[in-house]
Amino acid sequence: MNVITQFSLLSRVLHWLMAASILVMLFIGLFMASSVGPHYHRLVTIHRPLGIAILVLALLRLANRLRTPAPLLPAEFPPLLKLAARASHVLLYMLMIALPLVGWGMLSAGGYPIPLWGQSVLLPPILPHDPTMWAWLRSAHTVLAFALFGLVLAHIGAALFHGLIRRDGVLQSMTGGGNTSNATGIGKTS
Amino acid sequence: MATKSSGPPGVALRWAGVVAAPAALALGFLWAGGGFSPHRVTQDRLMSEMHASGSYGHGFRRRHAKGVCVGGWFDASGTAAHLSDAAVFRERHVPVVGRFALAVGQPDVADNPATVRSMALRFMPPDAPEWRTGMNDPPVLALRDARDASDQFLTQRIDPSTGKPDPASMNGFLTNHPWLQKAADEIAHRFVSSGFADDTYHSLDSFLLVASDGAKTPVRWAMVPAQSVAPADERTGDPNYLFRNLVAEIHEHPLQWHLMMTLAGAHDAVDDPSQIWADDDRQIDAGTLTLATVESEDGGPCTGISFDPLALPPGIVPSADPILQVRSAAYMRSFFLRSGETRGPSAVSPVMTATPGQVEGKRS
């Protein structure tokens, strides 16, 4: 019944690099948006280049995902859960790309200079200066960030459900622990 | 079913594992947002404290709500170029958009000479990153950090029974913050000029100038008027007389200020805007600001931007002064809130700022 193969090494590297970046990014974002210091400026300074890095990685990853097929879910997996899995992955990709673009767009519309690296490397604006648009995008940035965080939590829960409850090799297809071993050490292997 | 049976305790433990990781992250997220630190001074908290102290909102800035847009240029003298790499210290005729304002939260407040006045500027060299700065006319700021700022807004809270802040609590602020007493005295006894045009505006916070070799020089700066200075005189009955005078003066001739850089001496506190610097610090005239145009905020070029003091070009970096970050974060939040609101007409209307002759019925 073990038809699951692993994700390619490139897919796995991209996945875990982005997993770490996105979690760090979500925490920085929430912390700085509710803070007035003393780390506010440093966090804002990290938030911009990290967001652009995530955008670049997400586009690379999308290209990689479209070129190399992902392992199939187990055949006996309920169709409704398969649909949920597929939809949540599509949404994750959309948010990984949309959030940095909305952030970049909102600073453009707000008329802010957008330093990417140090003070000399600036990003060009991608939208015209429009304060109403800035306020709208700033709200959207928050809403989308919370949506991404919720999806990430569901994604982690689902991965652990595969790994700990179903033990169907889906978690191992991304952790790289091999498709028959039980990487968690909980319970006994088949 | 792929699930292997290992007895009820094992299953429960494994389900706990499934739930634990997302739950731990959710708690961490709650922590990052301040959920476990009720005393943290957040952006929302500063905004609501300002609201409670009478800040009007409705599309206007939460502070410095009554203002007018100005335009002009900056000519560097070149004398600061060896201290900072910033283009603005070596170029001529750098375009500037600016704003004069009263540092209060009510856009319709009557002009009063005692109210703190501000000058905010956006320098836009055509070939280099821009520089924004917001300056006030008192020489120091009676705040040291975010906590002081929050405490001060709280003491300015409007008492619903009187419609005014409670004077006892305002006096109590200094009793509870004795480290700000000296700055408060300095501000209370400052020289007050007759209007916007003959006023001196101070950076309050300190910054570091960075030279091309990387050498850093801590500075504060001030815009010192080239116009002759007169003390504040009797108030007229006109609630907009300060702005009306400014408009008339700019229409008459361009107004000029010298950008004076004060270099920190050995004993000057760089990271504390409530500390006054020594009188004998070295000063450099970095260049001349010329303001030649004036426009109402209704449609004016200074309305849709935030004068974030951390929007700095290469060659100027922030000091570790905590107030700089408070200002940057609070300005951004204020800009976000007001940009999403419907805004009424400004007290300083386009009719008031129109060039004489273009408008009949200009009030005397």
Image (tube, coloured by chain):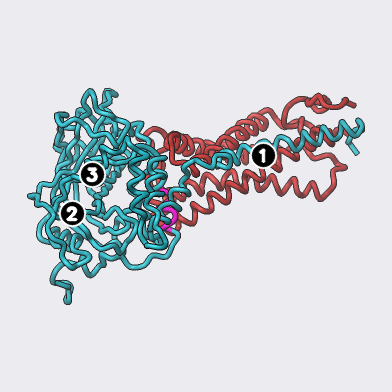
- Would residue A43 be found to the left or right of residue B267 on screen? right
Q: Which residue is mark 1?
A: A65
Q: Quadrant of residue B241?
A: bottom left
User: What residue appears at the point 62 percent right and 40 percent down from the top-left corner?
Assistant: A63
Label 1: element kind: helix
Residue extending furthest left? Answer: B228
User: Front-most of B96 and B146?
Assistant: B146
Q: Which residue is mark 2?
A: B196
Q: Is residue B248 magenta?
A: no
The quarter of the picture where the C terminus of chain B appears is bottom left
* Up-down relation of residue B34 to residue B81 (above or below): below
Badge 3 and badge 1 both on one subunit? no
Label 3: element kind: helix
Q: Quadrant of residue B55?
A: bottom left
In the rendered structure, are the residues bearing label 3 and label 2 in contact, judged by CB atoms less than 8 Å apart?
no
Q: Say which of marks 1 and 2 sits in front.
A: 2
Mark 2 crowdedness (10 Å alpha carbons): few <14, some 14-19, many ≥20 = many
Q: Which residue is mark 3?
A: B187
> x%, y% of residue A66?
66, 41
In the rendered structure, are the residues bearing label 1 and label 2 in contact, judged by CB atoms less than 8 Å apart?
no
> x%, y% of residue B37?
54, 39
* Up-down relation of residue B211 to residue B173 (above or below): above
Q: Main secondary structure of the magenta part?
A: helix
**Could you say which chain is coloured red in the image?**
A
* Mark 3 vs 2, N-terminal side: 3
Label 2: element kind: loop
Chain ID for label 2? B
User: Front-most of A87 and B9?
Assistant: B9
Q: Which three-letter amino acid code belongs to the residue tagged 2?
A: Phe
User: What residue appears at the point 78 percent right and 35 percent down from the top-left corner?
Assistant: B16
Chain ID for label 1? A
